Image (tube, coloured by chain):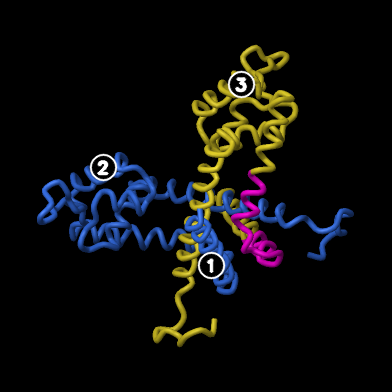
Chain colours: A yellow, B blue
Amino acid sequence: MTSGPAPAAGPEPLSKSRLRLWLRLLKASGHIEEELRRRMRAELGTTLPRFDVMSALSRAPEGLKMSEISRSLRVSNGNITGIVDKLAEDGLALRVAVPGDRRANLVRLTPKGRTVFADQARRHESWIDGMLRGLGPEDLSGMIRHLDHLSRTLEESDANA
Amino acid sequence: MTSGPAPAAGPEPLSKSRLRLWLRLLKASGHIEEELRRRMRAELGTTLPRFDVMSALSRAPEGLKMSEISRSLRVSNGNITGIVDKLAEDGLALRVAVPGDRRANLVRLTPKGRTVFADQARRHESWIDGMLRGLGPEDLSGMIRHLDHLSRTLEESDANA
């Protein structure tokens, strides 16, 4: 940084820069998420949690247990139940029995659900592409690398906790 | 990136990298937020929304209207009311009348509230410092620069919407 004189007290302590980065991360991700919620509602007539449930199901052609959906999204089973009920009602998902376990069901997208989700995922990707258009290839690869590194550090701390 | 052969189809399209960055941002910020919630509860006996309300109040020595607190945190007035009631009960904040406006109150931290918050803010900063310790000065300044650029792009889009 060469713009402007150095502050008299010397460079900012690293802990302040890390706090600043966290506040910036929170601001940017909150802003993007809010915009996604708005467009999901206005342009696709859906919600972000519903999109996230369909996204998890789209990656599991065999189906997922309710507890697996809830774990992958970090939200409660109760909320997922309402979303899956509505998806089933709309013909986008169905519950199938697990052979040998009378109490467990797997939730799976229907062919219609897969088609609808594929279209929504394309729209979602193009919105993100537009919102992040200010970031070029090097910016992206640098940030992805740093965020991966950050996530690994956090996971190691979890493992040691 | 020199590790491994290039994919046959050439480099990943930018829209895929941008989507990937968004998913990484979401993962890292979700992880940090979850860990902050846990520590706020376990080590300080408080919650993240309560900390955020005190943080907003700490930056406004004259006090804030309920609507100003709610706007600065992007949460509903209803939730803020419960938090402010509890802070007042605990002697950490108080409501003062606005001269000339019988219906409006300003919420302000008490001296005790300022002391308690200053201690919590120090702890919060040191947690973030620990969680982000894998990022050095250049990593931090690069990411802050990119996130600022990203937030500016998003704000310009909002203004043009």
User: Where is A85 relative to A60, above or below?
Assistant: above
Residue drawn at point x = 64 percent, y = 32 percent: A54
3D distance between C-alphas at marks 3 and 1: 43 Å
User: Where is A110 relative to B67, above or below?
Assistant: above
Expressed as whole percent of the image width and height from the top left, the position of residue B14 reads: 72, 57
Residue lying furthest right: B8
Q: Classify residue B91 as left or right of residue A159.
A: left
Q: Do the residues labelled 1 and 2 touch (CB within 8 Å)?
A: no
Q: Can you tell which quarter of the image residue A16 is in?
A: bottom left
Q: Quadrant of the N terminus of chain A?
A: bottom right
Chain to which mark 2 belongs: B
Expressed as whole percent of the image width and height from the top left, the position of residue B10 reads: 85, 57
Q: Mark 1 points at which residue?
A: B144
Query: Can residue B131 be seen at all in this image of the molecule?
Result: no
Which range is magenta? A124-146
Q: Is mark 2 on a helix, strand or loop?
A: helix
Q: Name the residue under label 2.
A: B81
Q: Name the residue under label 3.
A: A90
Residue nearest the observer in this picture, B18 or A69? B18
Foreground: disc 3 or disc 1: 3
Expressed as whole percent of the image width and height from the top left, the position of residue A59 reads: 71, 35
